[in-house]
Amino acid sequence: MSLDDLAIEYRGELPTAQEFERLFRSSGWTEAFTVPADRLEAALPSAWYAVCARRGGEAVGTGIVLSDGVLHALIVDVIVMPEMRGHGIGTEIMRRLVARCQEAGVLQVQLFSARGKRDFYERLGFVVRPDDGPGMELSGPP
Ligand SMILES: CC(C)(COP(=O)(O)OP(=O)(O)OC[C@H]1O[C@@H](n2cnc3c(N)ncnc32)[C@H](O)[C@@H]1OP(=O)(O)O)[C@@H](O)C(=O)NCCC(=O)NCCS
């Protein structure tokens, strides 16, 4: 099936709280840690920019940018519903998130690749940070 056949509409907006919860719970991440619905909803207003992919009005994918609008942007929560994966929706969401950051002239656009998604992001031009200047995190949820 081509992308045109799928008739996906991309909007520069957040999914609703209910849609975001459905997308988030489909990601597989909740096997590693639990986030209650009210906490998930509380995360949404911090978005600097977001894209929601819709099919027939229903949210099938999203991606969110957290940013100071000048120096740093962090792309998070890039999720496509499992049954809709592999058709280029994730790539288009990413393309739009990055374009918005570039339009705003944000200096550094960063993300953490989930396990197994390195190729997906490298195809979009992202490079792994060097060993002597790695991304770092406190130990906790993966
Ligand atoms: C990562 C994720 C968002 C990708 O979404 P997606 O819509 O499947 O992404 P795409 O379809 O653009 O690309 C996926 C694959 O399909 C291929 N593809 C892209 N367009 C295609 C098309 N039109 N037809 C067929 N295949 C296509 C791509 O080459 C890509 O291959 P890869 O898996 O080897 O990288 C999705 O797998 C997901 O939601 N995963 C769970 C959450 C997650 O881990 N998110 C990443 C957080 S860092």
Image (cartoon, grey):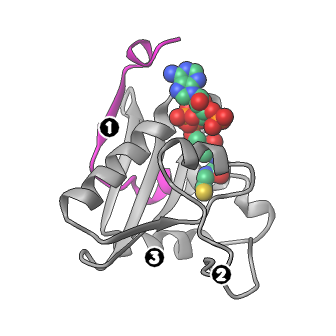
Q: Is residue 33 magenta?
A: no
Is there CB contact under 8 Å for labels 1 and 3?
no
Residue that label 1 marks: 10
Image quadrant in which the C terminus is located: bottom right
Residue at 27% from the left image edge and 49% from the top image edge: 12
Q: Can residue 87 be seen in this view?
A: no
Residue that label 3 marks: 42
Of the four image quadrants, the one with ligand 1 is top right
Marks 2 and 1: which is nearer the front?
A: 2
Residue at 55% from the left image edge and 76% from the top image edge: 39
Residue that label 2 marks: 132
Q: How far apart are marks 1 and 3 (CA)?
A: 23 Å
**Range drawn in magenta:** 1-20
The numbered dot on residue 94 is none
Q: In this view, does 15 lie to the left or right of 88?
A: left
Q: Is residue 6 left or right of residue 38?
A: left
Sequence-wise, the earlier of marks 1 and 3 is 1
Q: Identify the element where label 2 is drawn.
A: loop
Q: Is residue 124 left or right of residue 29?
A: left
CB at mark 1 closer than 8 A to ligand 1? no
Query: To which quarter of the image does residue 42 belong?
Result: bottom left
Q: Is residue 116 left or right of residue 107?
A: right
Bin the neighbour count of mark 3 within 10 Å (Cα to Cα): few under 14, some 14-19, many 20 and up: few
CB at mark 2 closer than 8 A to ligand 1? no
Q: How far apart are marks 2 and 3 (CA)?
A: 35 Å
